[in-house]
Amino acid sequence: MVFITEDLIRRRAEHNNCEIFSLEEISLHQQDVERIQHLDKWCRELKILYLQNNLIPKIENVGRLKKLEYLNLALNNIEKIENLEGCESLQKLDLTVNFVGELSSVQSLKHNIHLRELYLVGNPCAQYEGYRKYVVTTLPQLKWLDGKEIDRSERIQALQDYRQVQQQISEQEEVYLLKRLRDRQEALSQSSRTQGREPGADGRGDTDISNALPESAENKENCPEVDPQENQEDEAFWQQPSQYTPESRLETHRYIEEKRKAKESKSEEKKKVKPPRTLISRDGRPLNVNEPKLDFTLTDDEERNQLILDLGIYRHLDTSLVDVDVQPNYVRVTVKSKPFQLVLSEEVKPDSSTAKRSQTTGHLVITMPKASDLIQKPRAASPGVKSRNSSNVQCSERIETLEVDPTARSFPDVANIVQDKRSGAQGPLIPSNCKAKSAAEDEGDFSDNPEVPPLV
């Protein structure tokens, strides 16, 4: 049994920022709800309420919804129209395909003076003779009944035949109520027999598969294996004739739910536990793994001696769901518990690595300096492409050698020592190179060539 809880209402109130006290519209259809509750206390501002396709047997706990304008209760198990007098603003009521047999219960809608549309098509009362005349006369405020407009002539005719139609409706209601009483008793006895029945009690053995549908080889390959006994039970259940009553609808729903739960439990038992992803081999080698299936690029920046990994993480993914781990020979990024691991071609420094994320694209950029401090020489440009810094490259590639100027040597050349005869001074002998140097200092334009012998 499914109950209307606060959590369910808040999940259905996403359009109102999950606030329920100011909620004006809510849809609780197809939730297998079996009772209306809490809405008249928690959602007093409701104007539109969708409760179609559930298992609700009774209209209740909506009398305090003073602002309710539209109530949809189609495809439920409702047998009587009641407890709607407090819905002062109700304009449209949809009870399509229910089990309303007491047509006289529409008289309770006289107090809803703003009611303009009513849908009772698909109910047992809609088959009564004089049904439309009775409703039109009972509810003069109606403008539309079962999607068909009520014109003035129809209303006058219905009012004239009201006494006769009222007697017919009363007799048909009495017949229907007696039939419903027998259906309830029969459904109760059948449910007790079904609960005590064991497998094979329907006259067929557990291993009897003679009535099973033939299966071709192609069907066996494409379809999962079906238990013959389960197949027989399903066939027997769906082929068994039954009346269209609230009890049969509940029984069908519960049977489907039991089958669904049994199938889920079987699949969970057969479901194998997925082994964890292998990131490191048995011999200790890291493996390349891309479980989140992200685009990435790995760039080798030789000028800065580093590796750059650009990982295309989803733009709207929160950064708290991303974990980065840099190791000397691999990098691992965990995105929503899914690992991305890449083996590096060179060893890097984990402590000096940095990780940054773009605020526009969401990409994660990991910079990993290489463990080797050697900065490699940049590659030469191709001959056809002229480099902008060609002069700088030529200067760096020029070979420089250390040369000594022979004129600047401090030790005298004893092989070229001669006596200075231009001056008769008797003094120490002066080396020729030194003399030439001194003369060159006196005469600025003079340059001495050591290869020319001195004049005697």
Image (tube, rainbow, N blue to C red):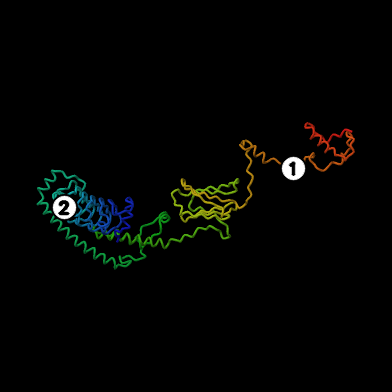
Q: Which residue is mark 1?
A: 402
Can you tell which mark lies on residue 1?
none
The answer to which of 1 and 116 lies nearer the viewer is 116
Q: Quadrant of the N terminus?
A: bottom left
Amino acid of disc 1: Leu
Q: Secondary structure at mark 1?
A: loop
In percent of width and height, residue 36 lies at 25, 58
Question: Cα distance, mark 1 to mark 2?
Answer: 116 Å
Q: Quadrant of the C terminus?
A: top right
Q: Residues within 10 Å of mark 2 (few under 14, many from 20)?
A: some
In percent of width and height, residue 295 lies at 50, 48
Q: Quadrant of residue 189?
A: bottom left
Against 253, is 442 above or below? above
Q: Which residue is mark 2?
A: 111
Q: Quick check: 338 left or right of 152?
A: right
**Measuring 77% from the left and 41% from the top, which residue is drawn there?**
404
Q: Which sits earlier in the primary sequence, circle 1 or circle 2?
A: 2
**Measuring 33% from the left and 66% from the top, which residue is drawn there?**
200
**Measuring 32% from the left and 55% from the top, which residue is drawn there?**
10
Against 228, is 117 above or below? above
The answer to which of 348 and 222 lies nearer the viewer is 348
Amino acid of disc 2: His
Q: Secondary structure at mark 2?
A: helix
In percent of width and height, residue 60 lies at 22, 58
Q: Quick check: 99 left or right of 208?
A: left
In percent of width and height, residue 155 lies at 13, 46
**Measuring 55% from the left and 58% from the top, which residue is drawn there?**
280
Q: Are the residues tagged 1 and 2 within 8 Å (C-beta)?
A: no
Between disc 1 and disc 2, the foreground one is 1
Q: Residues within 10 Å of mark 1 (few under 14, many from 20)?
A: few
